[in-house]
Image (tube, helix red, strand yellow):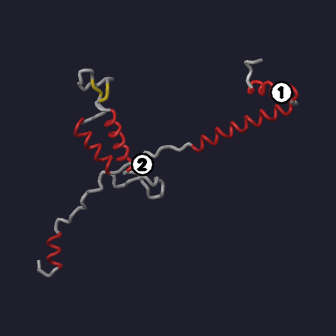
Amino acid sequence: QDCWSEGDALRIKLLSWLPHIPVSIMAAAMKSLVALLLLAVSCGATLRTEQDPCAGCDESLAYSYQVCAKEHGNPCAETSEAGLVISGQGTKKDVSCCLKKEKHERCLKCTTLDCSHSTCSKHVNKKYYSERTMPEVDADFDKKAMKAAGWGL
């Protein structure tokens, strides 16, 4: 009895009460436990959120994509052990740059989404990859400005 701990004695004492608990109470407790387990699983499934593919489409991603494109061309191209691009299965030129390229392509698709009926998430950047685009200039703006200023053209 020297090798028994106080915890073991407590467990044995609790287990000795088990045969004295009525079956109906045990069944109700087991049903309640199963119901709680199912509730926890269903709540966990509804709390799980999906990632927004249009989040993170900003100028820093565009810049990092351009750096990768400059260094690797197509970073997702499969290469052989000799480092040559092959058409079959191999290793990617650069995995992190490949992920940036794939994200860049998803962001370009996000810019074409129709958000007119509030169907887009708040993360959609409609100006991705065209944030610094200059507005189109009227070819005859100088003639119009001169005429407006009274130069008589």
Q: How far apart are marks 2 and 1 (CA)?
A: 55 Å
Q: Mark 1 points at which residue?
A: 18
> Which numbered marker is on residue 58?
none
> On the rendered structure, is 133 left or right of 9?
left
Q: Position of residue 136 (x, y in %)?
A: 23, 61
Residue occupying the point 73% across, 34% down: 34
> On the rendered structure, is 151 left or right of 87?
left
Above or below, 125 against 8 in this view is: below
> On the rendered structure, is 13 left or right of 74?
right
Q: Where is residue 71 in the image (x, y as percent from the top left)?
A: 23, 37
Q: What residue type is labelled 2?
A: Ala
- Secondary structure beneath dot 1 equals helix
Upstream in sequence: badge 2 or badge 1 = 1
- The quarter of the picture where the N terminus appears is top right
Q: Position of residue 19 (x, y in %)?
A: 86, 25
Front position in the image: 50 or 15? 15
**Extreme front residue here?**
2
- Secondary structure beneath dot 2 equals loop
Q: Are marks 2 and 1 in contact (CB under 8 Å)?
A: no
Q: Where is residue 37 in the image (x, y as percent from the top left)?
A: 69, 36
Above or below, 84 against 64 in this view is: above
- Neighbor class of circle 2 (other Cα within 10 Å; few <14, some 14-19, many 20+) is some
Q: Mark 2 points at which residue?
A: 55
> On the rendered structure, is 136 left or right of 20?
left
Residue occupying the point 88% across, 28% down: 20
Q: Which amino acid does label 1 sit on?
A: Leu
Q: In which quarter of the image is residue 89?
A: top left
**Extreme bottom residue here?**
150
- Neighbor class of circle 1 (other Cα within 10 Å; few <14, some 14-19, many 20+) is few
Residue occupying the point 33% across, 33% down: 95
Residue occupying the point 15% across, 71% down: 142
- The quarter of the picture where the C terminus appears is bottom left
